[in-house]
Amino acid sequence: MTQQFTIETDGPVATLTLDRAEKRNALALPFWEDFPAAIEELDKSGDIRAIVIAANGPLFCAGIDLSAFAGVAGDRSKLGAAAPLDFIEKVGRMQRTFTVLEEARVPVIAAIHGKCLGAGVDMITACDIRLATKDAAFSVYEIHIGMTADVGTFPRLLNHLPEGLVRELAYTGREMGAEEALRYGLVNHVHETHEDVISAAQDMARDIATKAPMAVHGCKRAITYSRDHKTKEALDYIGLWNASMLNPSELMTAAAAKQSGQPGQFAKLPQKTRLDEAGS
């Protein structure tokens, strides 16, 4: 695994920090394989209850590293008629890089500072919660380099912003500042400094980590399902979820924790293991 980012854990909270400051945290080819593998590894342990995505350097992310385009496109002449399929499959893998954030069992919080461009927008819109510094700015930057964003911008940005505004951002590539992003709901809160936003994200993650992991996971599943389905379908889904997952012992543990002020001893999310591993 290449050093595209670092990972630190503090009890049940993991912080993944983009760490190519000298390249403005542009996302090189190894990132698209290493990042989803790292998120899935954190998620499968059962010990991590929330993940924070942050970045080093003067800005959060400059988008895809332009050198990555050559690697994705490859030498199409060698593939002949199969070249389009090869390209589509590679793009699908890149789209999967951020889909793992939505599919993670635990909440993912983005702590954004400075500019967040292109694929950086794809990344943060796949997170559950977004916090930003007052100097943060977001841009669907792909239009400036003559391409249509294809790694997740439009389906996810439309979950957070009005369609007309998404069209404006896509067609012009203009920057949306933190206050505008807050006003429209793209970010939850705005903080003064880089240090402040990371601290706030980690505090929020620690707060989430005190709650019952199964209940938090159920909330994430239910909210995502409800966003993508009709109300009746979502109500049925939530009813079935609680019919199968709700455990009276978790309710009693939560009540005892609230009364005592001590952390609740909740059931952990199950560790994801191979089917042929002992104890699975």
Image (cartoon, rainbow, N blue to C red):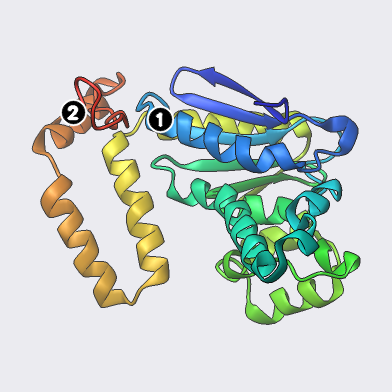
What residue is pinned by disc 1? 209
Q: Which mark is residue 246?
A: none
Name the quarter where the N terminus is drawn.
Answer: top right
Q: In the image, what residue type sits under mark 1?
A: Ala
Query: Rounded to the nearest whole Å, what is the CA distance between mark 2 and mark 1?
Result: 15 Å
Label pair 2/1, CB-CB below 8 angstroms: no
Q: Residues within 10 Å of mark 2 (few under 14, many from 20)?
A: some
139 with respect to 216 (left or right): right
* Quadrant housing residue 174: bottom right
Secondary structure of the residue carrying tag 2 is: helix
19 with respect to 220 (left or right): right
Front residue of 250/115: it is 115
Residue at x-position 77% and y-position 54%: 74
Q: Residues within 10 Å of mark 1 (few under 14, many from 20)?
A: many
Give the x, y percent position of residue 262.
Answer: 30, 18
Give the x, y percent position of residue 255.
Answer: 19, 32
Name the quarter where the C terminus is drawn.
Answer: top left
What residue is pinned by disc 2? 253
Q: In the image, what residue type sits under mark 2?
A: Thr
- Looking at the image, is mark 2 or mark 1 earlier in the sequence? 1
- Label 2 vs label 1, nearer the camera: 1
Front residue of 218/98: it is 98
Secondary structure of the residue carrying tag 1 is: helix
Residue 68 sits above or below residue 247 on the image: below
Front residue of 170/278: it is 278
Residue at x-position 90% and y-position 66%: 144
